């Protein structure tokens, strides 16, 4: 007979993971749709004009991205604490993949800062014409797009590993865990296909790459925050089951 115990640190980590998951998701939605979609649209000249006109808002987006990176580290730590008893090696691998994603997001944020530096036109940049600086800034912003999908591959792998551990542990409903595995593998597979074959987006829209996994992360965060992880359960070997039955 094997008893899978849930200790207090796991229960606290579940609350932290639930809150952090919702918090980081809210930041991403705010920055992407409230700032980036508003400012980083159109040709190089239009983007330059939007960013310089709303520089404070653009800087808020950079700050929020950095906060998001901190949230990712907190989240991966909490998930590791919860899932380590199930499989320490796989939980550590998932944490490492998520850390790679966080590091890539930091690089994306640096690209935003570089674009702003180019557009503000420091003294040493005056040797370049304005349109060239705008083009370089647009290139720096476009680099973040490529980096995101490289990072998304690692995030999908991390989520798939965690989904498997959720499924194995029975800490959350099996249907939710299974959906997490499927949606995460789908995300990682689509991202890898997109990196190799850019025209893959004609078959599967970019929005569908991570949307199912995002839904899983949202439901999981709500579950962990308000319901927590399930109480200890008992796993009995066939021999033990037969002994109990005969008694």
Image: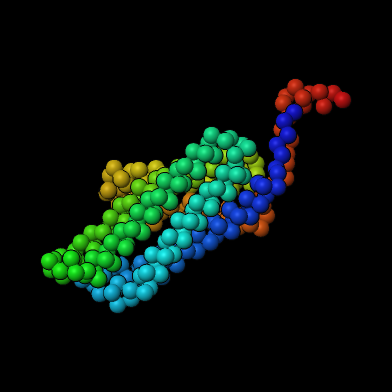
Number of callouts? 0
User: Is residue 112 placed above or below 13 in the rendered structure?
Assistant: below
Residue 221 placement, left or right of 140: right
Say whether residue 71 is visible.
yes
Q: Residue at x 38, y 73 (%)?
A: 57
Rendered view: 115 above or below 221: below
Image quadrant holding the N terminus, namely top right
Place of residue 86 in the rendered image (x, y in percent of width and height, measured from the top left): 61, 36
Depth check: give the residue in front, 239 or 137: 137
Q: What residue is at 33 percent from the left and 51 percent from the top?
A: 147
Q: Nearer the viewer, residue 11 or 243?
A: 11
**Which percent across, then down, holds residue 234?**
74, 35
Quadrant position of residue 51: bottom left
Q: Compared with residue 67, is residue 87 higher up or lower down, i.e. above or below?
A: above
- Where 32 sits versus 77, above or below? below
Quarter residue 69 falls in: bottom left
| Left or right position of 41 against 166 | left
Q: Is residue 187 visible?
A: no
Residue 203 on image: x %, y %: 33, 49
Residue shown at 31% from the left, 56% from the top: 144
Furthest toward the bottom, the residue is: 53
């Amino acid at each position: 007979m094997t008893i899978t115990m849930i200790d207090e640190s796991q229960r606290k980590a579940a609350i932290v993971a639930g809150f952090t998951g919702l918090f980081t998701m809210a930041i991403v939605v705010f920055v992407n749709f409230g700032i980036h979609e508003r400012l980083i649209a159109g040709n190089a000249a239009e983007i330059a004009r939007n960013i310089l006109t709303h520089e404070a808002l653009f800087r808020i987006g950079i700050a929020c991205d950095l906060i998001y990176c901190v949230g990712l580290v907190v989240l991966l730590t909490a998930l590791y604490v919860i899932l380590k008893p199930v499989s320490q090696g796989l939980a550590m691998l998932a944490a490492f993949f998520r850390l790679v994603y966080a590091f890539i997001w930091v690089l994306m944020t640096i690209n935003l800062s570089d674009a702003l530096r180019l557009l503000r036109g420091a003294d040493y940049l005056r040797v370049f014409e304005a349109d060239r600086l705008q083009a370089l800034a647009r290139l720096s912003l476009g680099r973040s797009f490529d980096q995101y999908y490289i990072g998304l591959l690692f995030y999908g792998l991390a989520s798939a590993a965690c989904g498997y551990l959720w499924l194995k542990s029975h800490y959350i409903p099996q249907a939710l865990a299974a959906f997490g595995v499927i949606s995460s593998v789908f995300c990682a597979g689509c991202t890898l296909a997109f990196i190799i074959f850019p025209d893959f987006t004609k078959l599967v829209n970019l929005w569908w790459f991570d949307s199912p996994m995002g839904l899983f992360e949202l439901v999981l965060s709500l579950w962990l925050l308000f319901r927590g992880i399930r109480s200890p359960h008992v796993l009995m070997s066939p021999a033990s089951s037969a002994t109990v039955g005969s008694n």
